């Protein structure tokens, strides 16, 4: 044994012991002295927390046809500190992305580790970027909202911002349902920044957004938009709206506006095209509003529809103002007053009705307050209380002047007559469901209050049938389907607060068939020219939309 | 002799420990490698899903009423609904157009099959009818 441990071996042994002691001391210092800062440094290098983005919910029409979907597109970023040959990189990137070289150079020269170059590029551009394989340039996936139908129902659907937050329409109103919940993942990454799978891995998966199902039918919407578009161009109008509604459930089957925009290319359209005129714009309805006066008069039982009024042969002086009919009439029954839209006859009926009762019916029909539809930007309109009326207000208001109404309010008002006398809240959302199809929330149709009795609603429907059959709305006639409705031609107010002789708002509000209505259709045209009467501009549009509606729903005409 | 044996044992033990350690490290490396491969496959799967969504969007875009109308307009194709007099309705279709119910079973087949299968009624609500209160 002693022979094995030679002096030389002893020296080696002592050396190893000293080395071991040194290593032990160093280990002691590192483990106890510098443990915390070193752990933190290691954690910063290896730990990775990743945000998991949820998929935004889909917006469907009532037949589950997609209106808005989300896809993933790549966005290009650069790590300026890694890029070596900046000139060549800038040249290539400018060529592919078609962005000015100076702009790219400015970004590549920044003293940051992450700079965006282009967001959400097309798959072709992504392929080109991958093919050049520039060190320091990377791609990261981002969700992108797309609208397959383009301009169709754009005012209803709305659009999202670059970070997928709703900015208009249903995208805005139901953003909290559509956006979902962000998840996260904690894991370790290696020296090449690759995630080490399965090692110290924790995840809370994202919850995808809920889907929204509208009451809109995309075919009915397409019909309304096509007819509105052709008339909008034909009459050089400033704006227009069409609403198609189920008078019993309040379902909005179509809501179209012009001018319109494509939510896929927001920046290419002026801001004013994004306005949902059907709920955000109010206007003086003109003769369409006579349905309110007529309803008040008949419901109060002040006289029968066959009682006659003298229409002063077209000119009637009341106070300091002279009222005119567009065509002179003598004695007309109240039925004919509405049929031929006599202002003078209506005024006289209103004078019997009185201010307070007329105001009460205006409120009953929903004017002067929001309908409560689930769309942003809805306005109340303007309905002043009788205390604020002048001596002439009763006459003016009875003819649809001195007040402001929206197209949707008119649609709800005329639907009240169509469905037997109930004011019903309009509905644009049917339900919200999750990505597996489970119901999250249902929106039931709501009958709010009675406006007129069922019997009087029937009488009013017959009167309005007369408007189309023999009155000012003849161009709205649809053979075999017996529509009913009311025309309206209202002068607009100029800047100097006088009524214009060149600018008008034309309207036709109606439903069909008159005895058992299936649909309410409201057509509004803002400043049509050269023709401007509701009967010549809007009534034919109503006819075209109604005809196609009946065919689409396979409703047979009656003899 | 005893010392030599002990040294041998120590050396063998060290050797075995080292071997085990190497095997463990190799195993971890393999696990890591497989994990990376799985991740890569998931990435490919995710990209294929994204590509599928883009294709679905393209199909929806092509099918949309607005695009179909624009295409028809561009080709100057005018469509209109047929008039009543243009539609011919046949009361008695020829035998070759009558759909034979292939699923009807014979008498003996019915004897040996337990229970009945539900059959859908041909008069299905097509979803276009309106709801009324």
Image (cartoon, helix red, strand yellow):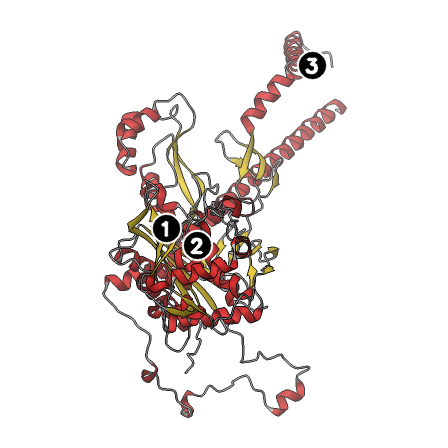
Inter-mark Cα distance, 1 to 2: 10 Å
Q: Position of residue A443 (x, y in %)?
A: 59, 56
Question: What's the chain of the residue with tag 2?
Answer: A
Question: What's the chain of the residue with tag 3?
Answer: A
| In the foreground, A34 or A147 | A147
Q: Which of marks 2 and 1 precedes in the sequence?
A: 1
Same chain, labels 1 and 2: yes
- The image's mark for residue A31 is none
Residue contact between numbered discs 1 and 2, judged by CB atoms under 8 Å? yes
Seen in the picture, residue B23 relative to A84 is either above or below; the reply is below
Which residue is under mark 1? A321
| In the foreground, A238 or A298 | A298
Inter-mark Cα distance, 3 to 2: 129 Å
Can see residue A306?
A: yes
Which residue is under mark 3? A4
Which residue is under mark 2? A395
| In the foreground, A271 or A350 | A350
Q: Position of residue A389 (x, y in %)?
A: 48, 46
Instruction: Kindly indicate the quadrant of the structure image that contains residue A152.
Output: bottom left
Q: Which of marks 3 and 1 precedes in the sequence?
A: 3
The residue at the far right in this view is: B2
Q: Position of residue A481 (x, y in %)?
A: 41, 75
Horizontal arrangement in the rendering, residue A495 relative to residue A351 (left or right): left
Question: What's the chain of the residue with tag 1?
Answer: A
Q: Secondary structure at mark 2?
A: helix
Mark 2 neighbour density, 10 Å: few (under 14) some (14–19) many (20 or more): many
Instruction: Kindly indicate the quadrant of the structure image that contains residue B61.
Output: bottom left
Seen in the picture, residue A481 relative to A2 is either above or below; the reply is below
**Quarter of the image that includes the C terminus of chain A:** bottom left
């Amino acid at each position: 044994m002693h022979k094995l441990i030679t002096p030389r071996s002893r020296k080696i042994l002592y050396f190893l012991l000293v080395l071991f002691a040194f290593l032990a001391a160093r280990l002691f210092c590192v483990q106890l002295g510098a443990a915390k800062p070193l752990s933190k440094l290691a954690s910063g290098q290896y730990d990775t927390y990743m945000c998991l983005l949820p998929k935004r919910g889909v917006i469907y029409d009532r037949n589950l046809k997609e209106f808005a979907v989300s896809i993933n597109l790549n966005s290009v970023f650069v790590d300026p500190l890694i890029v070596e040959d900046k000139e060549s990189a800038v040249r290539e990137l400018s060529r592919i992305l078609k962005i000015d070289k100076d702009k790219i150079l400015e970004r590549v020269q920044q003293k940051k580790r992450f700079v965006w170059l282009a967001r959400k590029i097309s798959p072709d551009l992504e392929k080109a970027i991958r093919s050049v394989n520039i060190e320091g340039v990377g791609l990261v996936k981002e969700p992108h909202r797309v609208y397959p139908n383009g301009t169709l129902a754009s005012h209803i659907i709305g659009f999202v911002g670059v970070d997928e937050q709703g900015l208009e329409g249903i995208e805005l109103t139901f953003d909290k349902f559509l956006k979902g919940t962000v998840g996260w993942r904690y894991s370790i990454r290696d020296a090449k920044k690759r995630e080490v799978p399965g090692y110290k891995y924790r995840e809370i998966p994202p919850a995808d957004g809920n889907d929204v199902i509208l009451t809109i039918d995309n075919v009915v919407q397409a019909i309304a938009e096509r007819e509105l578009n052709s008339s909008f161009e034909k009459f050089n109008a400033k704006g227009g709206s069409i609403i198609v509604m189920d008078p019993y459930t309040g379902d909005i089957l179509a809501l179209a506006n012009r001018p319109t925009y494509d939510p896929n290319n927001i920046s290419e359209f002026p801001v004013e095209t994004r306005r949902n005129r059907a709920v955000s714009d109010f206007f003086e309805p003109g003769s369409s509003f006579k349905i309110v006066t007529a309803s008040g008069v008949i419901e109060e039982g002040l006289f029968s529809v066959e009682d006659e009024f003298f229409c002063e042969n077209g000119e009637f002086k009341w106070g300091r103002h002279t009222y005119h009919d567009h065509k002179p009439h003598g004695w007309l029954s109240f039925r004919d007053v509405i049929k031929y839209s006599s202002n003078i006859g209506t005024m006289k009926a209103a004078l019997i009705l009185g201010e307070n009762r007329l105001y009460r019916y205006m409120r009953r029909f929903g004017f002067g307050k929001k309908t409560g539809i689930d769309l942003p930007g809805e306005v109340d309109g303007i309905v002043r209380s009788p205390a604020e009326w002048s001596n002439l207000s009763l006459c003016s208001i009875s003819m649809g002047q001195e007040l402001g109404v929206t197209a949707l309010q008119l649609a709800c008002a005329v639907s009240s007559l169509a469905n037997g006398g109930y004011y019903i809240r309009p509905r644009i959302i049917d339900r919200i469901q999750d990505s597996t199809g489970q119901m999250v929330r249902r929106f039931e149709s709501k009958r709010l209050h009675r406006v007129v009795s069922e019997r009087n609603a029937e009488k009013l429907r017959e009167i309005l049938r007369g408007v189309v059959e023999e009155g000012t709305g003849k161009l709205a006639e649809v053979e075999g389907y017996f529509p009913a409705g009311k025309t309206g031609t209202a002068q607009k107010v100029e800047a100097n607060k006088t009524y214009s002789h060149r600018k008008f708002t034309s309207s036709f509000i109606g439903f069909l068939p008159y005895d058992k209505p299936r649909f309410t259709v409201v057509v509004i045209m803002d400043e049509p020219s050269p023709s401007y009467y509701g009967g010549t501009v809007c009534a034919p549009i109503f006819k075209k939309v109604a005809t196609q509606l009946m065919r689409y729903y396979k409703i047979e005409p009656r003899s | 002799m005893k010392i030599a044996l002990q040294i041998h044992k120590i050396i063998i033990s060290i050797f075995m420990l080292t071997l085990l350690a190497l095997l463990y490290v190799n195993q971890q490396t393999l696990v890591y490698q497989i994990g990376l491969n799985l991740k890569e496959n998931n990435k490919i799967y995710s990209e294929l899903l994204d590509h599928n969504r883009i294709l679905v969007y393209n199909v929806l875009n092509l099918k949309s009423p607005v695009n179909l109308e624009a295409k028809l307009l561009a080709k100057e194709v005018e469509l209109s609904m047929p008039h009543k007099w243009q539609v011919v309705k046949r009361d008695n279709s020829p035998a070759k157009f009558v759909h034979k119910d292939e699923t009807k079973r014979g008498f003996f087949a019915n004897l040996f099959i337990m229970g009945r299968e539900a059959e859908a009624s041909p008069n299905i609500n097509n979803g276009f009818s309106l709801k009324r209160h």
